[in-house]
Image: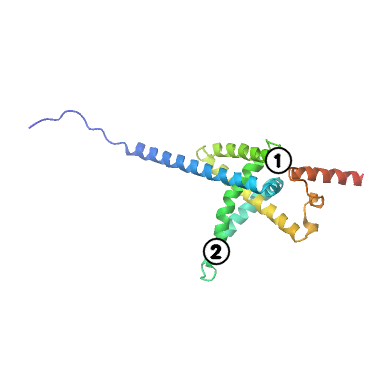
Amino acid sequence: RGTVQGHVEKLDVNSLFAGFVVVILAVLWLAVTLSTAVLGLLFVWLFPRAADAVVVAGRRVWASFFVGLFLGIIAPILGVVVMASVVGIPLGVAVLGTLAVLWPLGYVASALIFGRLMVHGSGSGGRLGAFFAGFGILRFGALVPGLGFVIGFFFATYGFGAVIISAWRAGRRAFGADELQPEYAGTPPPPLEEEPWAAYAAARAAKRRSSA
């Protein structure tokens, strides 16, 4: 009968679980970063006028944030309530599906608005540069434990509200509600490569000259 010498080391389950969580969070961060970057690239590249309109709407920071917060709370509740009836299931699914698209778009919009504080170039290059500048800062901020969630929630809500405000303004212009349009809306539409705030500044200057 033989004797085995040595000692048995216990498996550190806590360290193993912590490593597993870190790997899952890293993969999730990478997946969100890549998917959101693609969404932002498509949004800025395919819809440049909408991107510019969102930047203009985003100047109203707290209005955008509270609009996004209000609709972000009310719309899911409304969708669930509507789905309680069999007839309302398609409408409820449509509401929740729209939110599932608009929330990531809100994060993209907030990255573009934030990036416009640093990158002021015109044209597609300026828009893309502004988006990726703001997007890079937001994604690195998301790596901060605890604070990353707060940053993501605030900017996604704020961008969501800016998207809603810009869509509301566009809808009112489409239906001819001139009296409710922004002050710069009465000016001719700028060329494709001109920034919307340039038309806004020109309208303000013309108004000051006419009142002088």
Q: Residue at x 54, y 66 (%)?
A: 90
Q: Secondary structure at mark 1?
A: helix
Q: Quadrant of residue 167?
A: bottom right
Quarter holding the C terminus is top right
Q: Quadrant of residue 113?
A: top right
Whether pointer 2 and pointer 1 mark residues with C-beta atoms closer than 8 Å, the reply is no
Is residue 66 visible to us here?
A: no
**Residue under circle 1?**
123
Left of 13 or right of it: where is 199? right
Q: Residue at x 80, y 58 (%)?
A: 178
**Residue under circle 2?**
92
Q: Is residue 97 above or below residue 6?
A: below
CA distance separating discs 2 and 1? 39 Å
Q: Secondary structure at mark 2?
A: helix
Q: Is residue 204 above or below residue 90?
A: above
User: Among all residues in the image, which is located at the extreme left?
Assistant: 1
Q: Position of residue 108 (x, y in %)?
A: 60, 45
